[in-house]
């Protein structure tokens, strides 16, 4: 930073603006609180302009990417009961990194499905901070990750209560408005389902939704490859923006 | 039935008491509505006495078993906001039966995670009917099943808003009271997590829970083998009760 | 053909030159025996010049590709006891195509390993014809394929008795001579092992070997992605040669 | 031993009678060479009488069990060209034990097939010693293990040249004579194939065979669960013999 280098940071250090929340979730004092104001949260679909000019990008985690992109457009339109947000995510094993621990051995993961990190997974901190910024009030959500025996991919299913009666066309329109021109967002609508194998090796996020008139809820579903759109792919997308390159450069082949 | 034979039925035909709901979810008129009053829902932990005397047992589906057993004790204690119940389930591929369809080919399921049946999976009908009986009022829940590449097993994660402030000990006590003596319910408490591989080939249901003081919700988690406690194992358990055999006969080895 | 179109054929129809062998292995009379003389076997590392000029390319099957490329250089050098060739292959499930049959359901393949097609798999016909051409005498080999629960990839292990005492450097030199300049052959030498995951999505064939002084045999091992180098990737490689394009065009990204 | 306790040893220490071979394959001097004469190789189908009286049983490894049981009856009948034996084995990941190493992480094994331990896997020592005892001459074989992404199970495929022309009925008769009364050997004959999923959790070994008239070879195929017949299950079988219990005690349920 001192030498003027612009940085795209894949670590968690600058994802949270509030150093006290950082300490609460990561256990130690923030190592460089004076740089927090410089950091831009690297979600291009939300912060494209800021990313272009940023000196320091904090790349979002994989779960936050899969949750924020489907959720933020509906929050922006004030149709979400903010106290009602419940999120389930299912992640492949590379989501845990490449830690050489018993929990991640083949014979421990194969033929196994398990929840973990309930109720306070680390990624909750950055998800809630972003939601709170958009809602202009403090938001707390319910989030449960699960480990599933695939190499790559995340499925996120989000349940929200709607603040007023809307129809399916209205949700379609919200997503069209938010993402119709986005190169890496594919809108699956209210009939198709996301599937991790359809995004493997790509920087796409696939988003689908359903309205449940019986319960007054909408169900939002997304899939990403945790290693691409959920990590280094998104970092490249940010880098392209910072350098004025075409946003899709280097991201159109697996 | 006419010959006086007592029947344990693994099909869905007698799981729902109301023939109009049957038609709504299964698409055709109920084939034998006059027998509906005879049928007992085959969940031994809930209906043991009735099962012992029953002439016709309707064995619950796999998802309902994994949802009702964790949820009913809390509903019975009036601590659940009934409008708030959100359920995510993750199922292995045998949950779909042995249908020879493209969707269930190895190369379609392996390295794939996908939601399906949203928002109105067939099993919702029997789940909601049972919940409504216990709550003594109409209950509608949110339920999303997901397909995951394992052969056997279901993980169910249930989110409920609590009607009043309770602590973790209180939940422990509710489950102890409900299931301490049950031979096939293992209570994992609020520190351990269920894992499908720990119940594979067994008639056990493992139940864990967490309280989230930030959100006022409890998270209930269960695992079963969909082929045993979720199907034929539970049928044997019912049969044992009907015949006065030890309830665990034939169910203590995989 | 009549219209002058040059054809790259992925089917088995023109892989075998002898129509009586075609009938023996495929069960019916050859549908176009008059075209057999035109057909060139589409293994670029072996038939590059002929492929460039060909009007009809018969793309090799996946098993033959994984067997012929490691084996032919040693046969060409006359170090192989031709009666001694034993081949084991392990294939992912897409090797069977996308047939909607019980055998290829997820729950039938997952947690399953099984040999099949012993002793006379269809691919044996083209393998033996090619070996016989190179050896200038009739060659019969032993070949056993196995089905393994991965989506993509073949590992082939070949056992040969050597006709004379050679050392490891000699084998290294044979492979260097044959393949040093090949863009899609990677020589792993006598210390590393092939692994299907290292070739997934690529047109590479990885080849490794060991000499066993105790038995006088060499063990040759290869890995390919059955869908790329074992099928359409190799077809593109042939197409590039036919059209005078760079041989690697379209084949350098997964 | 000094206290008169009879021992069933699952380690490799007493599987090889010759301490110099032990040193060659395991790298250190044998820790108790004076006990080697006491040790009986714990393959009940071959050494039942000796096992009954033994003070020290050396339980065979998983690969040797899967190789010796199909191979020994044919060697005993003098139909095997002893210089021609080539063996391929495919093993699930628990065959490597529960070592917490990068090689055995989920993401390293899933979607991966790989040979290893070529040409001199440790188990070769005990396999060749047993074969040599039966052949009454020194035997060296070719053996290649492969790692495959399943939890449990081994498939072994053995190729042998026959010393004289025999027919399929003759092989059937050899196996019937050897194993017709064995409780844990299932003879699949020359039309069916072994599959690891058919032996998972059991003490069975399934054996199938084919005769290839074109090449003069027989192909022998077996499957076991490496954790049961390949390890502790076989140890229990030995224990039952030593104590005079029914040989199948404790081994008839998974």
Image (cartoon, coloured by chain):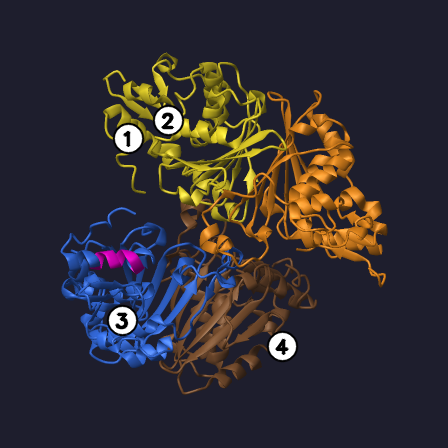
Chain colours: A orange, B yellow, C brown, D blue
The residue labelled by disc 2 is B45
x 50%, y 25%: residue: B124
Mark identifier at residue A90: none
Select label 3 or label 4 by which is in front: 3
Q: Which quarter of the rendered picture does the N terminus of chain D lie within?
A: bottom left
The residue labelled by disc 1 is B247
User: Could you say which quadrant of the image residue D23 lies in?
Assistant: bottom left
Helix, strand or loop for disc 2: helix
> In this picture, is B105 found above or below C22?
above
Where residue A254 appears, x then y in whole percent? 66, 55
Mark identifier at residue D14: 3
Residue lying at the far bottom of the rendered structure: C165
The residue labelled by disc 4 is C181
Instruction: Looking at the picture, tell me which residue is in the foreground, D124 or B155.
Output: B155
Q: Residues within 10 Å of mark 1 (few under 14, many from 20)?
A: some
Q: Residues within 10 Å of mark 4 (few under 14, many from 20)?
A: few
Identify the chain of the residue marked 4, using the numbered disc in the image.
C
Please indicate whether residue A225 sits to the left or right of residue C124 in the image.
Answer: right
Question: Do the residues at pointers 4 and 1 share their chain?
Answer: no
User: From this viewpoint, is residue C36 visible?
Assistant: no
Give the residues in magenta: D230-238
What separation in Å lies between label 1 and label 3 (alpha carbons)?
46 Å
Helix, strand or loop for disc 3: loop
Tag 2–tag 3 contact (CB < 8 Å) = no
Instruction: Looking at the picture, tell me which residue is in the foreground, A191 or D172.
Output: A191
Helix, strand or loop for disc 1: loop
> In this picture, is B200 found above or below C88?
above
User: Could you say which quadrant of the image residue B196 lies in?
Assistant: top left
User: Could you say which quadrant of the image residue A243 lies in?
Assistant: bottom right
């Amino acid at each position: 930073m001192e030498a003027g280098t612009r940085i795209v940071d894949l670590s968690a250090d600058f994802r949270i603006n509030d150093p006290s929340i950082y300490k609460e979730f990561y256990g130690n004092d923030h190592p460089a609180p004076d740089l927090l104001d410089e950091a831009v949260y690297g979600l291009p679909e939300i912060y494209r302009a800021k990313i272009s000019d940023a000196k320091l990008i904090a790349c979002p985690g994989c779960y936050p990417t899969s949750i924020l992109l489907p959720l933020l457009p509906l929050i922006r339109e004030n149709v979400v009961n903010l106290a009602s947000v419940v999120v389930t995510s299912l992640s492949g094993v590379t989501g845990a990194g490449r830690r050489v621990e018993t929990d991640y051995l083949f014979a421990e993961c194969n033929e196994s499905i398990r929840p973990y990190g309930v109720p306070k997974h680390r990624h909750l901190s950055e998800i809630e901070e972003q939601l709170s910024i958009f809602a202009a009030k403090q938001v707390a959500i319910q989030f449960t990750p699960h480990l599933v025996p695939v190499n790559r991919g995340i499925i996120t299913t989000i349940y929200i209560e709607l603040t007023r009666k809307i129809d399916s066309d209205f949700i379609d329109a919200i997503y069209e408005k938010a993402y119709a021109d986005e190169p890496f967002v594919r809108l699956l609508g209210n009939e198709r389902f996301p599937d991790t194998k359809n995004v493997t090796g790509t920087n796409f996020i696939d988003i689908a939704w359903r309205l449940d008139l019986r319960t007054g809820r909408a169900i939002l579903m997304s899939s990403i490859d945790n290693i691409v759109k959920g990590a280094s792919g998104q970092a490249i997308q940010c880098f392209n923006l910072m350098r004025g390159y075409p946003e899709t450069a280097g991201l159109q082949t697996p």
